[in-house]
Amino acid sequence: MPFLYHFDPMYFIFMLPALLLVWLAKARVDGAYRKWSNVPNNLHLRGADVAQRLLRYAGLSDVRLEAVSGQMTDHYDPQSNVLRLSDGVGHRPSVAALAITAHEIGHALQDRDGYAPLKLRSAIVPAVNIGSTLGWILILIGMLLQIAQVAWLGVIVFAGGAIFALVTLPVEFNASARAMALLVDAGLITDDEERRGVKSVLDAAALTYVAGLGAAVAQLMYYVFLVAGIGGRRRN
C-alpha cells in the first residue's frame, strides 16, 4: 500500500534504499548461482546424490527427497519432513548443487535439533500472514477516520512482517554454517575452489534475507511516518 489517499513520493524516499539493496542482492544471488551451477563439483555428484549422502551421514534417514518445479525453489518442509530439490540442483553435478542442497539439509538439522529461532519463525507464520493484510487495513481505516489508536494498532499488527524477517536471519545464517561444516565433515568439499564456490553461493543467498529485512523495516517506518502525522494534523 504505497499510498493511502493519492500518490505519495515519501513512500519511495523510504523504500528506495531498501529496494536498491533487494535488487543488488538478487543480482548477486543470480550471478553466483549462474556461475557455480556451471562449475562441476569434483566428485561429480548431483544435488540428489549429495542429499542422499548428507542425509545418511547426518542420521536423517526419516527425511524424504522429492523434486520440485522451478529454479531456486529448493526448500525443506518441516511439516512433512521432506527435502525438495529443483531440477537445476537435484539433477546437476555442480558446486551450486553442493551449497544449496547442504543449506536445505541445514534446515532439516535445525528441525531435528529443535533450533529455537526456527521454532519461533514457524510459530509466528500464521500471525504474520494475517497481519500483512489486516495491518494496512487498520492503518487505512485509522487514517481515513483520523483515529490514531486504530492506525497505531495497524502499525503494531503490520510489524509482524519485520519481526519475521528479523527472526529469519539467524535461521538462514545458521543453516549456511551447518551446511559448510557438513560438507567439510562428510568429505564432499575437496579443495579450496569448491569451498570458495560454496561460500559464494551461501553468502549471496544470505544477502537476500538481509535485504528482505531492510525492505520490511523501511515499509514499517513509512507507515509509522504516516500514522505519526495524524496527531500533528489533529493538534493543528
Image (tube, rainbow, N blue to C red):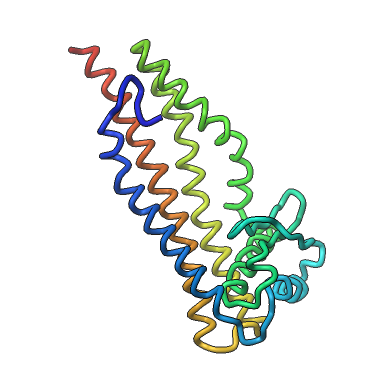
The image quadrant that residue 152 belongs to is top left
User: Residue 5 or 92: which is nearer the viewer?
Assistant: 92
User: Residue 177 or 74: which is nearer the viewer?
Assistant: 74
Looking at the image, residue 234 sits to the left or right of residue 128; the answer is left
Q: Position of residue 34 (x, y in %)?
A: 50, 69
User: Residue 112 or 87: which is nearer the viewer?
Assistant: 87
Q: In the picture shown, does residue 166 fall above or below 196?
A: above
Query: Is residue 227 at least partly visible in the picture?
Result: yes
Looking at the image, residue 155 sits to the left or right of residue 14; the answer is right
Looking at the image, residue 100 sits to the left or right of residue 234; the answer is right
Q: Position of residue 177 (x, y in %)?
A: 55, 69
Q: In the picture shown, does residue 234 fall above or below 212?
A: above
Farthest right residue? 62
Q: In the picture shown, does residue 28 fall above or below 147?
A: below
Q: Position of residue 194 (x, y in %)?
A: 54, 83
The image quadrant that residue 188 belongs to is bottom right
Looking at the image, residue 164 sits to the left or right of residue 28; the answer is right
